[in-house]
Image (cartoon, helix red, strand yellow):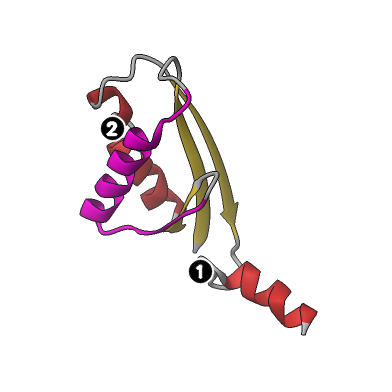
Amino acid sequence: MALMQFTMVPMGEGVSVGKHVAMIQKRLEEEGATYHLTDMATLVEGDVPELLKLLARIYETPFDNGAVRVVTNITIDDRRDKIVHIGDKIEAVQKKLR
């Protein structure tokens, strides 16, 4: 199980890109993805091949919504020694703080 973090930033859209983020979240919901929106990115969990296919399926969303240029950043944490889920890392750190 892996975690993928991505940001898709439409260029030339002004200060707010919330409408694009909302459309991407809607597509993730339609895809049945396990995801979490943060202030700076979106996290999705799954197997790497499936995550990359998912990203390919939602990639056109900002363009379909009027964007003409999009900068995309992707980070994948592929842990093979145990199954991880969104929120596990936060929980592990919080346990250390108790």
Image coords of residue 31 (percent x, y): 24, 53
Image coords of residue 68 (percent x, y): 34, 14
Q: Residue at x 50, y 69 (%)?
A: 85
Mark 2 highlights which residue? 61
Residue at the farthest right position: 97
Label 2 residue SS: helix
Magenta stretch, residue numbers: 15-38
User: Is 34 covered by the magenta stretch?
Assistant: yes
Quadrant position of the C terminus in the picture: bottom right
Type of amino acid under label 2: Thr
Left/right of residue 67 with respect to residue 16 in the rendered view:
left
Within 10 Å of disc 1 (Cα), the crowding (few <14, some 14-19, many 20+) is: some
Mark 1 highlights which residue? 85
* 11 is higher (above) or lower (below) than 97: above
Residue at the farthest front position: 15
Is any atom of residue 78 visible in this view? Answer: yes
Q: Quadrant of residue 59?
A: top left
Q: Quadrant of residue 34?
A: bottom left
Within 10 Å of disc 2 (Cα), the crowding (few <14, some 14-19, many 20+) is: some
* 59 is higher (above) or lower (below) than 47: above
* C-alpha separation, residue under disc 1 versus residue under disc 2: 25 Å
Whichever of labels 1 and 2 marks the residue nearer the N terminus, that label is: 2
Image coords of residue 86 (percent x, y): 51, 65
Image coords of residue 28 (percent x, y): 30, 50
Left/right of residue 58 with respect to residue 13 in the rendered view:
left
Label 1 residue SS: loop
Type of amino acid under label 1: His
Single out the mark in the foreground, 1 or 2.
2
Q: Residue at x 23, y 25 (%)?
A: 64
Is any atom of residue 53 visible in this view? Answer: no
Left/right of residue 51 with respect to residue 93 in the rendered view:
left
